[in-house]
Image: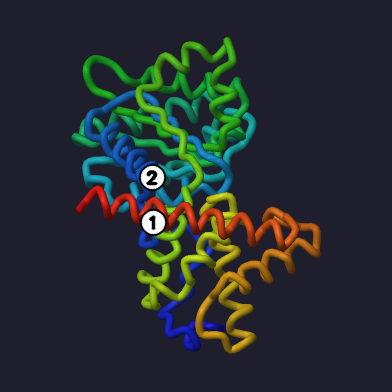
Amino acid sequence: MYEEFFRLREKPFSLIPDPEYLYLTKGHRMALTLLEYSLSEQTGFVVITGEVGSGKTTLVRKLLTTMPGRLTVGLLTNTHRSFGDLLQNILMVFNLDFRQGSKVDFYQRFVEFVVDQYAQNKRTVLIVDEAQNLDVDVLEELRLLSNINADKDFILQMILVGQPELAEKLRRPELRQFVQRISVDYHLRPLSVEDTIGYIRHRLRVAGGDPELFTTAACCAVYFYAHGVPRLINVLCDLSLVFAYAEEQREIDLDTVIDVAAARALTGLGPFRSDPEEKSRSEVKRLLSELMAGQAQQRRIRA
C-alpha cells in the first residue's frame, strides 16, 4: 500500500518471522552464538526464553539457515499437552509415519530413526517452539527421550524456546533432573532505546528504503510506547507508515508516532502504553536528551 510512496521494496515491519530482517543486538547475538555453540559442541538441552514478541522465533529461523548439513532438524511449532500427541507431532516433523500405532510404537519408531541418522554420521536436532505450553509430565517425557544419548556423542539434541513461563515451570522440584541436563540457557531481554533505533533503521535498510525515514525522536517514541519489544515495534512502525502515507507525509516524526499510539489507545485494545500526550512527549524528550548525551560522551572517549 505505502511501499511505492516511501520507495520501499517491501514492507519493512511485517510480523512474519524473517531471518533476513534479524537485527543482532548484543543479547540476540549472544543467544545465537550459544545456539551455534550448543550444536557444534554437542551439548545437552538448550533453553532460550523471552517475552512475547522478543524475537525468539526469528532467531530460530536464522539458526536454521546456518545449520550444517550433518544435522537432521525437526521444528515443532504446535505444542500439545499430552506426550502421545506430542510424540506423533515429533514423528510428523521428521516425515515419519505418525498415523498408526501405540505410544510405544511411536517411541520405538523415533528411536530407530535417530539411531539410523547416527549411523549415517548425522545428529538429530529437535527444536520445540512455544515450549511453555508443555505440561510438566511432557517435559519429563522429553527428558526420558533424551536417554537415547549414550557414550560420548549426543545423537539427539533438543532446543526448547518459550516465554518466561517455561523457566518458571522448569524450576519446579519434580523437574530437577531435567534442569541438570540443561547445558545452555539464555533469556532475551527487550531492546534498549539505542537498539530500537538500530532495529528500525536496519529493517528499513533491508527493505530497500531510507534508514532515516523515522526521525530519531520518532524512534525514541516507538521505544517508549512499545517497551522495546520487537513485535510491538513492528506494529507501531507499520501503522506509522500508514498514517504518514494517508497524510502524504514523507518523514515519520514524533507527532505521527504519538497519533498512532493515541488512536490504538482509543479502542482499548492496546498493546501500547496509554500515558497522557503531555507525559509521553516529556518522556520522549528525556530519552532523546539522554541518547544525545550518551553519544556525545562516546565521541569524547574516542577522541
Provide the residue designation for mark 1.
22
Disc 2 residue type (three-letter): His
Q: Where residue 6 appears, x then y in whole percent?
A: 47, 84
| x 30%, y 51%: residue | 298
> Residue 250 versus residue 298: which sits nearer the camera?
298
Instruction: Please give left or right for residue 205 compared with residue 135 in the image.
Output: left
User: How far from the left and from the top, in percent, is residue 164?
Assistant: 57, 33
**How many neighbours does mark 1 have within 10 angstroms: few (below 14), some (14-19), or many (20 or more)?**
some
Residue situated in front as seen by the camera: 271 or 36: 271
Q: What residue do we see at 51% from left, 80% from top?
A: 251
Work out whether residue 157 can be spotted: yes
Quadrant where the image shows the N terminus: bottom right
Regarding mark 1 in the picture, which secondary structure is present there? loop
The answer to which image quadrant residue 130 occupies is top right
Could you tell which of marks 1 and 2 lies nearer the N-terminus? 1
Which residue is rendered at x = 26% and y = 52% of the image?
300
Q: Amino acid at mark 1?
A: Leu
Residue 36 appears left or right of 12: left
Residue 222 is situated, as x and y percent measured from the top left of the image, at: 56, 61
- Residue 218 x, y percent position in the rendering: 54, 67
Instruction: Compare residues 250 and 63 and report the one nearer the observer.
Output: 250
Disc 2: CA contacts within 10 A as few (<14), some (14-19) or many (>=20): many
What residue does disc 2 label? 28
Of the pair 278 and 17, the residue shown nearer to us: 278
In contact (CB < 8 Å): disc 1 and disc 2: yes
